[in-house]
Amino acid sequence: MRLRVIGSSPAWPNAGSAHSGYVVESDGRRLLLDCGPGVLARLREDEAWPRIDAIVISHFHLDHWGDLVPWVWGSSYRSGQGDERPELWVFRGGRAHLAKLGGELGFSDMFERAFRLCEYDAETPFATAAGLDVLPVRLPHYTLETYGLRVANARRTMAYSGDAGPSDQLVELARDADLFLCEATLERGELDGEPRGHLSADEAIDAFGRSGARRLLLTHRPEELELDEGLERAYDGLEIQL
C-alpha cells in the first residue's frame, strides 16, 4: 500500500497547496480519499485525466469535496472523453444531497453522469473498486455528519481522521493501524468552538498514543503553526510506502 498526499491544506489554503486529497494505491489501483479544491489540477500534473478507481468523501465541507464539481465538467465537456467513471462513495443520504447541489449548480444528475454513486453506512465496511476495504467511523465535527476512514488491504491498514474533534471513536479508528493520517488544525483545543470540530497537535498525538498505531502523519495543518521536532507533517507530493 502506498499513500500519496495530493492536498494537505486546512480549510483555508496554505501557499501553493491544494485542499484535502490523498491517493492510496494498492496492486495498481487507486483510491482517492476526499477531493478538495486544487486536487484535480494537482492530479492532472501527472496525467491528462486522473486514473482513479474510487473516491470516498468523508464529509461535505467544501475543502473536502469541492473539486468533484470541476471533475464533472471535465468529464462531460473536455475532448477525448470515454474514461471509466470512478466509484464515488458518500455517506447514506449523500446521493440525495448531491442531486440537490446538482440542481443548483447545473443539473440534478450531474454527479451521476461523472461517477458511479454509492452510499456507505456508519460502522459498516465496504469494498471499493480500488481493491481496498474501507470502514467508515462516525466522528464529531461540529454538528456536521462526518466520518473517519479506515482503509485496508490484506497486508496493511491506514486510518484517516478526516476532520474531527477529540473522541474515543477517533482512537478506535486508528487502533493498531500502520499509519494514522490525522488532522491537527488548531494551535490549542480551547480555541475551537462547541461542539468540538478539530484537533490540536497535542490532541492528535494523544489519540495516536492511545490507539497503538505505528506511525503518525499530521495533516490539515496551517503553515503558520509550527510542530515540535520529530513530528511528521504532511505536504503536497509526499509519498509513503507502507
Image (cartoon, helix red, strand yellow):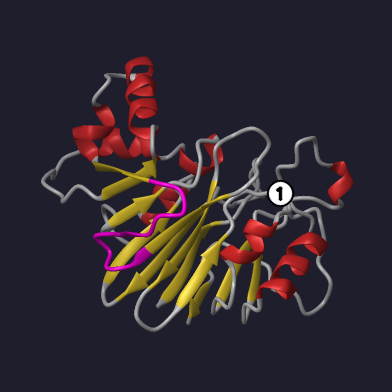
Magenta residues (range): 121-133
Q: Quadrant of residue 192?
A: top right
Please provide percent x and percent y for residue 107.
27, 19
Magenta stretch: dominant secondary structure: loop
Please provide percent x and percent y for residue 24.
40, 67
Please provide percent x and percent y for residue 225.
81, 56
Position of the N terminus, as image quadrant, is bottom left
* Residue 131 higher or lower than 195, as above or below: below
Badge 1 local density, few (<14 within 10 Å), some, or many (20+)? many
Identify the residue under disc 1: 165
Q: Is residue 193 left or right of residue 43?
A: right
Please provide percent x and percent y for residue 131.
27, 68
| Residue type at the position of mark 1 | Gly
Q: Is residue 21 left or right of residue 56?
A: right
* Residue 91 higher or lower than 55, as above or below: above
User: Can I make out residue 219 in this image?
Assistant: no
